[in-house]
Image: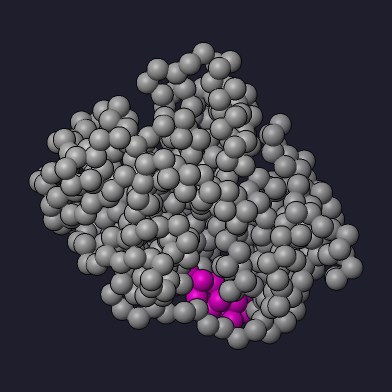
Amino acid sequence: MTTGTDHHLIEIDGLTKAYPGVVANDDVSFRIKPGEVHALLGENGAGKSTLVKMIYGLVKPDSGTMRLNGAPFAPAEPRAARASGVAMVFQHFSLFEALTVAENVALGMEDPPGQRELAHRIREVSETYGLPLDPDRLVGDLSAGERQRVEIIRCLLQDPRLLIMDEPTSVLTPQEVDILFETLRKLSSEGTAILYISHKLEEIRALCDSATILRLGKVVGECTPREVSARDMAEMMVGTTLHVPTREAGKGGEVLLKVSGLSVASTTPFGTTLKNVHFEVRAGEVLGIGGVAGNGQDELLAALSGETLAPPDAVSLRGRPIGQLGPNARRRIGVLAAPEERLGHAAAPDMSLTENALLTGVIREELATGGFVNWPKTRSFAERIIAAFDVRTPGPDNAARALSGGNLQKFVIGREILQKPDVLVVNQPTWGVDASAAAAIRQALLDLAAEGAAIVVISQDLDELMEISDRFAALNEGRLTAPRPAKGLTVDEIGLMMGGAHDMEAAHA
């Protein structure tokens, strides 16, 4: 591989990009060598996404230059970047739900092989990475974790020289992360450079050779991740001492939410059917539910939120059967939920933040009277969410899709918490959120529990679950293990629970 006279694969010099009211990148410079795994760190809104979009040809810089392999590099579009050997795994999936895995992969290739050969390569590569995929399945029937696999494998089939990864492990289990890291280290040893964005700082320490830290669009530091602590990196990102969530143990009040023998058939051919799920959550308690993506997480949230109806007695609030109540009826009595997919499910992409605040807040915040929306009151609610959860946006009139993933996540979670629910069910509450914002969201969940709410947190982030949960259970193929006290659980025990060791867990119930 030719790397130029200074042996850097890519050189970024003085990149600047401004939008109305905000400078996204301000004179950003750094370099990456062939085979180097380079982390790009920063809070949500620090400018990471804009920077990698310029490298990938999605955004044109206002000023500054890039060089790739010693030659000027200014891709006018992603196709040009890919032709130069730059590939990118996006945080938000860029997939067509009505097409198969193989058809989606083919769309990302300039000269795809025939479908049979491509299907063979997808199976071969996905099995090598320990992320098995059926090339014939419709993307619309895949879980979030499986969709992320499609994105990763689509990029790796391009044999890139520079691979940009934006939160690639958000929906992977620890075991899958280990396998992915083995693959990335192999790519690195073969000379592929990797630009790696993640809010999981221990991952950065384990994987990355170097790191560039952005704050408010500017480079504020560089470090060797292995030589500093995760807390050190987090504090470089935010510029202040990092707040660590604190709480008292759950008070164990009355049982608010009870789920008894919940069995719900999947609404899609490739979804996961819930099978005889039992648990209860008391006032002031946080129940953490872990599991590998695609084991019934979305179906459980839908059954608890009312999107999917269940037998009346299968779900109850304070002893009252609510299984047949829809989402609005459940919101009215205090059962609120925030789903995993923030753009398109939790929020309408093209609607403003004010309009999105109305969608779930109209009942509990009394935002409409006699069928007429009180827009000043609705806007005020949106402004309260933005202020309370530090949502980085020009204002409540901005469209949801204009926010960075982490900022939209803060808005979606904040919208539900500020409505003071009796029961809150959240799926992946801090997916793609930086360390500071994740700590703030977790603290807000703990504060809500301290006020007497019952909280169910569904997450693939085991560190998160162990930090905030009073009890822990795991989903496997639509079955839930018996909840156990989170304190003292070992990684091996958690792994067995996630693998479906139901008989063992029943003995501990």
Number of callouts: 0
Classify residue 169 as left or right of residue 492: left
Q: Nearer the viewer, residue 198 or 304?
A: 198
Q: Position of residue 67 (x, y in %)?
A: 18, 40
Q: Nearer the viewer, residue 115 or 34?
A: 34
Which quadrant is home to the C terminus?
Answer: bottom right
Which of the colour schemes (rainbow, by chain, secondary structure, one colour) is used? one colour
Q: Could one spot residue 331 in this view of the protein?
A: no
Residue 399 vertical position relative to residue 102 in the rendered view, above or below: below
Which quadrant is home to the N terminus?
Answer: top left
Q: Nearer the viewer, residue 478 or 389?
A: 478
Residue 330 is a magenta residue: no
Q: Position of residue 506 (x, y in %)?
A: 87, 65
At 34% from the left and 37% from the top, the residue drawn is: 161
* Res 337 quadrant in image: bottom right
Magenta stretch: helix, strand or loop mostly: helix
At 31% from the left and 44% from the top, the residue drawn is: 34
Residue 144 vertical position relative to residue 471 in the rendered view, above or below: above
Residue 169 vertical position relative to residue 55 in the rendered view, above or below: below
Magenta extent: 440-453
Q: Position of residue 118 (x, y in %)?
A: 54, 20
